[in-house]
Amino acid sequence: MNITRRRGAIALSITIGVLVVVGLIVVNIAWIILNERRIVLLVLGIILSGLLVAGVVLNTVFLVREVRRNERQDSFLNAVTHELKTPIASIRLYLETLQRRDVPEIQRQQFYNIMLADSDRLLATVEQVLKAGELGSRRPQDRTLIELAPLVADCIAITLRRHHLPAEAIQLEPVSGNVRLHVHAVASDLRTAVLNLLDNAVKYSPESVDVRCTLQIAHYTNVVLTITDHGVGIPADQIKRIFNRFYRVPGRNAVRIKGTGLGLFLVRAIARQHGGNVHAESPGPNLGATFTLTLPLADPAAY
């Protein structure tokens, strides 16, 4: 119902804008005809009419953008509500089971592990929302020297546990030449970026998870983390938009696969704050995707 109303509001705004512009053009033509021999009035009328047309067009564009922004924010609120309620409901269910029944020790430990994973998921959602609010306003933090391979390996272990996956589902390829790759970064931010990329790869591989991660040096000055999945892929016309705040690719997967629409936005913001960037590639729908995170390589003299 809300989507239908917003589409109606967008259509109405565009229709009114077009009608006003057409009316102004007609008035301007009439003004030109009536004042074709009065140069000053003719020029003044053309200028004022042009300004009015430009103002109406800009107002219509801004209005449509605002309606679409509100739609994305509502989708974000719905997604966050789901991401918070689901693990809470799961934890509550297992706690009630433990409270009411005499559960064998092996099953009890399984329940504990599931509840820990759900609490990790809950904490990750909260941290994601808080981080999105922090990045644009906080003061610069001190950066430390971080070796990337252990950090990525730790993020992989967290993702495997969070999604209850076997170890072979996400693999980190050995760094060629056993080179130790370091960057200067805020550790918590960098961990957030890598976790979001891994979580994205897992969520959009609904059939079977097969994710491969590689680390390498590019152009002697950058370190590149590449994460490749074999999931649902990304339509070509959506690749540049997936890093926008609250944006999720429309279609059946956006409905079936839950998320807040903040993950990739955070990755790009963190990468740029560290002097790097991130970009995505995909052969097309159902052909998987590759995300490449690029960061400046730390000076070897620093370690």
Image (spheres, grey):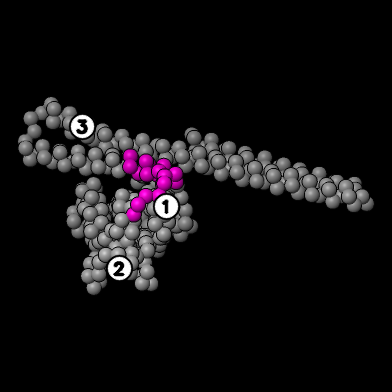
> Quick one: SS at disc 2?
helix
Q: Is residue 223 above or below residue 143?
A: below
Residue tagged by mark 1?
269
**Which residue sits at x=34%, y=37%?**
82
- Residue 183 figure quarter: bottom left
**Which residue sits at x=60%, y=43%?**
62
| Image spot of residue 99 (x, y percent) | 13, 27
Residue tagged by mark 2?
301
Q: Is residue 100 visible?
A: yes
Q: Is residue 280 visible?
A: no
Decide whether residue 270 is among the magenta residues.
no
- Residue 124 figure quarter: top left
Q: Label 3 amino acid?
A: Leu
Q: Label 2 amino acid?
A: Ala
The answer to which of marks 1 and 3 sits earlier in the sequence is: 3
Marks 1, 2: nearer the viewer:
2
226, 145: nearer the viewer:
145
The answer to which of marks 3 and 2 sits earlier in the sequence is: 3
Separation of marks 3 and 2 at Cα, in angstroms: 54 Å
Q: Which residues are magenta?
A: 126-143
Q: Is residue 295 above or below residue 96?
A: below
Relative to residue 167, is residue 257 drawn left or right? right
Badge 2 density bin: few <14, some 14–19, many ≥20, Cα 10 Å: few
The answer to which of marks 1 and 2 sits earlier in the sequence is: 1
